[in-house]
Amino acid sequence: MLVFAQKTSQVLLHMAVAFGVTYGFTGSLAVGGLAAVVEPICNVLVLPLHDRAWGRLRRSLSDGNTPTMRRRAVRNMPQAAAAEGSAA
């Protein structure tokens, strides 16, 4: 029950901030009200994509497979091949 109350409070806070900021910029109650409704809907649609991206990043970091490490590996590949060729 406490989790439900917390989530409801967060949604209402989001809506109030969206309304207040939009009303402050536009001076329009209608546009402020529209923003208060549309903004939480957009968050609901985008949040799973955000969470998925962070999950991929966490998995990459736990595997030690970061983008920087991949770039270094690709950049060093020709040097490694040249070193092997000269050693032969």
Image (cartoon, grey):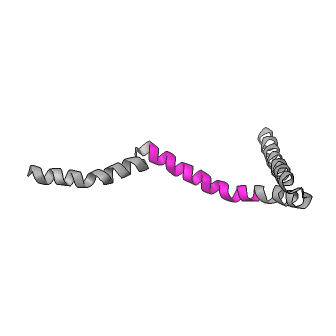
Residue 80 location (% of width, % of height): 21, 51
Picture quadrant of residue 10: top right
Q: How many dots with numbers?
A: 0
Residue at (90, 58) in percent of width and height: 28
* Quarter the N terminus occupies: top right
Q: Is residue 56 left or right of residue 2?
A: left
Query: In the rendered structure, does residue 54 fall within the stretch colored magenta?
Result: yes
Judge left or right: residue 40 versus residue 68: right
For image coordinates 37% across by 52% down, the residue present is 71
Residue sticking out furthest to the top: 2
Check if residue 74 falls in the magenta segment: no
State the residue in front, 30 or 8. Answer: 30
Q: Classify residue 60 as left or right of residue 49.
A: left
Name the residue nearer the viewer: 4 or 75.
Answer: 75
Quarter-of-image position of residue 78 = bottom left
Q: Residue at 66% x, 57% y: name it.
A: 46
Q: Position of residue 17 (x, y in %)?
A: 81, 47
Tell me: 7 left or right of 86: right
Q: Nearer the viewer, residue 59 or 86?
A: 86
Span of residues in magenta: 41-61
Residue ranking furthest to the right: 29
Q: Position of residue 64 (x, y in %)?
A: 40, 44
Magenta-colored segment: predominant secondary structure: helix
Position of residue 26 measured from the top left corner of the image (x, y, whole percent) = 85, 57
